[in-house]
Amino acid sequence: MANPWRDIYPIGFWNRLVGEYRSGALASSSATVGRWMRSILTKGRKLPQQIDRITNALSGYHAIPKDELQNFPSRIALLRGIHADSVEYCNKYNINKTIKDTRTAEDTFTSMDAYVWSIGRRAMRKAGYVEEIQKFCQTDLSDPGNMLRYLTDTRHVFDRFQHLQVGCRMEQLDPYHRGFEMHIREDGMVAGGDFYGTPMTSAFGEWIGAMQGGGSFSSVNTATLATPMKPFFVWLEAHPLTTGGGGPGDRWGKNDWGAKETKAVKYRGTPTDVGGKWWHWLCASSTGIVNELDFESLQMTPFNTNNGTTKPGDAPFKTYAYVWAQDGTLLAGIHKENSVHHSSFMAGKKVRCAGMIAVNDAGKVTLVSSNSGHYRPTKAQLTSFVQWLNGRRVMSDDAVVGFFEGDYQKIPVATFLRAASAAMPNRAHSLGNVADKNAPGRMAKNAPPGARSKQP
């Protein structure tokens, strides 16, 4: 998915394009416009009215302070107008989307037609993004104090399911689910180095005032932070992550503040759920193998993870990320940083268990783990999942279980289950026990993402 939070072209960049177009340095691929271009040098004819209107609207758009919520309607109107003029220009001169392929190795277009087409696409996406932020600002969690408490509260909710970790809630809260992960200790401390994880995490560090001189971040205690003045996503509209702005010699925005590296994480059932089929519905069948349900043919086919990835500590196994949902559904997909996380499958909702799974050519599970940074299931929750798989005879004879007990460990499944069985009398290890003190960072009792509207 294109990055809708990216702003449209700066007015200085656009004016330079127009100047190059008028001088003939930037051509047109349209025969009609080409004929017009050949005459402009001798007759001084004006620019097409659509380009004039785009220039005026763009100038007005960038003159409006972007980090003021009351200006959002005016910004949206100007963006929609730029898109409409772009469409009118492309229709009039028979410009279609194949024009986007007229790029050089420096990622610049070779014709003015392509830039007119491009600015229209950018304006359409940006208008939609601003509208989504406008909607989010009607919820309680748009309030800076409420958001800060929701994102940083390390208190536990005790139930039989596992919630997103405290430092991952922004990814779910964000209407576009951009990658966000920081490590908040139980005492509320965040190390300065943790703000460098993703562009969104770094921007959050700036929002809460953790940025020091020289571009570094200081460690902060989230329990004692002063409440920022502006809603985070409104404040972000004036930040380089969304406005772009390239370095010296940059034509526009190629070396900007992480904007191109910022990506939307796929969340099943949301607008970011794009790019082909990335998740698989698995069934531990009565035949003793793991099958996948194909929704087009409604047929079961044997499943394996041979094209998966190898997470640290799991070599030589090729694995998929999995989640065991509240209703017992088992979903899996290839784990991809800032693209497919464990939070992707259930759109950040709580789960029974999550981690990595390896399945061989015979449809047998050879590795199952609780290796999920977004959920960090307890050993009891992993035990429940391993028992469920083992009861369906889908575990291979040499299967191993990976879990965290201090360090990451892998042991044979039989050994793991024997240890779990021996611990059964101790109710502190049961799945539903509310006193499980080993459960790391469970979700706080705050309003969930998409919280109550401020309007009746």
Image: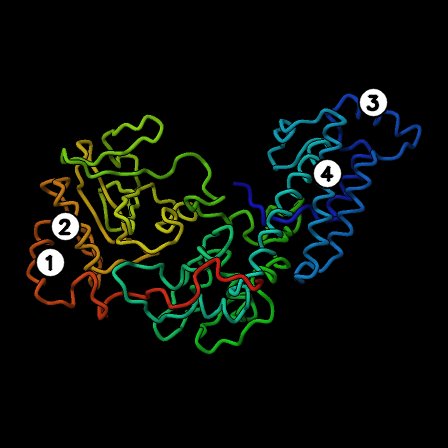
Q: What element carries label 2?
A: helix
Residue sticking out furthest to the right: 43
Residue corresponding to mark 1 = 420
Q: CB atoms at circles 2 and 1 under 8 Å apart?
A: yes
Return the disc, 2 or 4, that comes first in the chain's sequence: 4
**Which amino acid lies under the numbered mark 2 shown in the image of this protein?**
Gln
**Which amino acid lies under the numbered mark 3 shown in the image of this protein?**
Arg
Residue corresponding to mark 2 = 387
Question: In which quarter of the view is residue 186 placed?
Answer: bottom left
**Which amino acid lies under the numbered mark 4 shown in the image of this protein?**
Ala
Q: Where is residue 7 in the image (x, y as percent from the top left)?
A: 64, 49
Colour mode?
Answer: rainbow
Return the disc, 2 or 1, that comes first in the chain's sequence: 2
Distance between the Cα atoms at labels 2 and 4?
A: 59 Å
Q: Position of residue 98 (x, y in %)?
A: 62, 26
Q: Which residue is drawn at 52% across and 71% down?
A: 145
The local crowd at label 2, few if under 14, some if 14 to 19, many if 20 or more residues have their Cα within 10 Å, is some
Residue corresponding to mark 4 = 84
Q: Is mark 1 on a helix, strand or loop?
A: helix
Distance between the Cα atoms at labels 1 and 3?
A: 80 Å
